[in-house]
Image (tube, grey):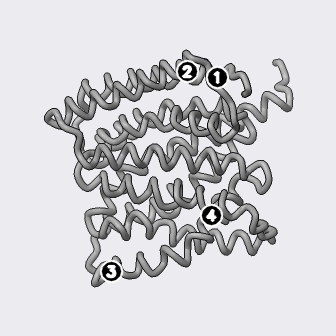
Amino acid sequence: MTKQSPKSRLDMMGLVYGMLGVMIFSLTLPATRFALMGFDPIFVGLGRAVVAAFLSLILLIATRQPIPSWRFLPNFVVVVVGVIVGFPLLSTLAMRDTSASYGSVIIGLLPLATALFGFWRAGERPAIAFWLFAIAGSSLVVIFALTSGAGSIRFADLALLGAVVTASLGYAEGTILARTFGSWQVVCWALLLALPIMLPIVALHRPDSFALVSGHAWLGFLYLSLFSMFFGFFAWYRGLYLGGIARVGQLQLFQPFLTIGASALLLGEPIKIGTIGFASAVLLCVALGRRTQSIARD
């Protein structure tokens, strides 16, 4: 039997951690639908980050992480706006009015959008083919929204697109910060930075009685807080570190299909052929677009 090289083992572990992260994130939209059964959307969108922030505080103290310099504050603010506030809040507002499987198609643009912001922040120039696939994928999402929404763009569509833009900007900025501080440390510091602002807002939108909130809503909220906002990032960033961003990042292509399957299993949402078709077409554009990332620097 051929013995695996250390690099091969690291690559394999990177794929394992990366797939674990994708599986955790694929349940975010269904879990949001569950949480909305008993909580206000603002509480769901921001409350998950409050819980994760207290966990981050414990972890940062326990591991004695050095406090980042103030000169990095603008960069951390971008991460906060993108992945701590923007994506969770906008995706939660969208889930009030549409299904999780529907949302997964639009969220499928996230890998491509993240690459675009990465190119912009790194001062690099994508190949023309990349832009063509980006436009094609975006056009498919618009067509899907129009044909599924009785010929008009709904608030949920705009919220989901906003979630894609904010999250991709936050991911790109977080990747830059991770070179200095480490991946999970960036998420923890961003959560802690946002805590003083989010805590009073979440308190204002708390339910009148937590005892009256259904078990399904609590389960959804706890999943979002512990996994989507905390442990999921640890697995995902660990996978990127071990297996490489380009290789492990391709695993995101499975996420919309996992979300559609989970939505059918947990929420009873029907699996529509049109949804699967559009998801496949969008992800094909994403996959082809990522393959054109032979980039010439400005």
Residue 289 image offset from top left, x and y in percent? 54, 22
To which residue does mark 2 refer? 130
CB under 8 Å between callouts 2 and 1?
Answer: yes
Amino acid carrying mark 1 in the image: Gln
To which residue does mark 4 refer? 190
Residue 4 lies, with reference to residue 39, above or below; the image says above
| Quadrant position of the N terminus in the picture | top right
Amino acid carrying mark 2 in the image: Phe
| Quadrant position of the C terminus in the picture | top right
Q: Is residue 3 left or right of residue 115?
A: right
Return the disc, 1 or 4, that comes first in the chain's sequence.
Answer: 4
CB under 8 Å between callouts 1 and 3?
Answer: no
To which residue does mark 1 refer? 293
Q: Secondary structure at mark 3?
A: helix
Q: Secondary structure at mark 1?
A: loop
To which residue does mark 3 refer? 210
